[in-house]
Amino acid sequence: MNLLAAGSAEVAEAFVEIGTVALVLAVLARVATWLRITAIPLFLLGGLVVGEGQLIPLDVSDSYITLTGEIGVLLLLLALGLEYTAEELQTGLRTGARTGLLDALANFTPGFAIGLLLGWEPIAALLLGGVSWVSSSGVAAKVLSDLDRLGNRETPSILNLLVIEDLAMAAYLPIVAALVAGSDASTTVKNVAIALAVVVLILGLAMRWGRHLSSLLAGSTDESLLLSVFGVTLLVGGLAQELQVSAAIGAFLVGIAVSGPVQQRASALLTPLRDLFAAMFFFHFAFAIDPSDVVRSLLPAVALVLFTVPGKLLVGWAGARRIGVAVPGRIRAGTALIARGEFSVVIAALGATLADGSELAALAAGYVLLTVVIGPIAARVDARRLAARIAPRPQPAPT
């Protein structure tokens, strides 16, 4: 009886923990809707407030937060993969490689350099470079939708760059994950080689044979489809993790493999589940950070913003220019890419076990908070008026 009572008490405590966190996140999501911004920065702030620093103490078991956060990462990347078809990925590789290289140079380099200047080990600096490199697809999509720009001429250049970044992450994440896990040079080289081979294999299978998986799932009920895609995602993610490949990339490739009408159905069914677990992931990431560390990292975070916001403006300008977009559209393309979000937090979380892991997490949190606020505000700037100042039209010669 005592054992049953103890078990009942643990279940009741777990229910209270889960309910409390869910309600806190619900309030933050409502506030974000009212402010017309993405909820990511508010979820991060919520985790900071009730987490390690305990400004407002909340007793939540770390194991529960960790598990739900990890599932959140997989669903975020699965949903991202569901946004793309194999044909779109192939087109992106053919047409956006040059702009993607400029993006990496302009936005990875400042993060890597600042990490080294802070005295971090090279692996932590590599992770910070990744944090500063990749734009938030979720925030960019929300900005384009909210401002009714999905049909604009510059929008294809924005989406193409996001595809290139996501593909680059398919190589970058397993490499840095192997570097973090490697104990010596030979082990690290072996892990990196295995990781890249597995990614290439899975990507090839997804692009060539994904239609067979989609055909197999096409006749499923909504319930069966949801459980099948969720189960395959966890299974592939777990196997990828065993092979020193990021589980998140495994989930991303599962999303790419699903195509056609099944892709649209799966995306609609998984959206509520993704929103729930993704909120838990952002909350968990900030939960383990001491707010005082974020304050101490504010200066480098601001420096990173000052270097990388112009980098994204340059990349957006170049990408839109390549397809013949006028100056106002080039400005809009750049501002839509400023915000960092999902991938930046995922990358920073990979470095949790490093000696500089806590500083990396704090700096990444501050940086994401700043860019997620700055990006949507910059996107609302009157691009035509700004373009007139940057490149005024020549006045007719006096007669």
Image (tube, helix red, strand yellow):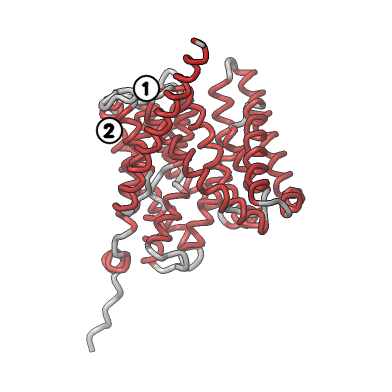
Image coordinates of residue 287 in percent, x first then y, are 37, 28
For disc 2, the marked residue is 298
Q: Quadrant of residue 44?
A: top left
Question: Toward the viewer: 317 or 28?
Answer: 28
Q: Is residue 297 visible?
A: yes
Q: Residue at x 37, y 55 (%)?
A: 335
N-terminal of the pair, mark 1 or mark 2, is 1
Check disc 1 and give the amino acid type. Answer: Gly
**Element assignment for label 1:** loop
Question: Toward the viewer: 55 or 323?
Answer: 55
Compared with 382, 55 (above or below) is above
Q: Residue at x 65, y 43 (%)?
A: 229
Image coordinates of residue 394 in percent, x first then y, are 29, 76
Query: Which label lies toward us, 1 or 2?
Result: 2
Q: Which residue is drawn at 63% across and 24% down?
A: 189
Check disc 2 and give the amino acid type. Answer: Leu
Image coordinates of residue 389 in percent, x first then y, are 26, 66
- Label 1 crowd (10 A; few <14 / some 14-19 / many >=20): few
For disc 1, the marked residue is 119
Q: Is residue 307 visible?
A: no
Quadrant that contains the C terminus: bottom left
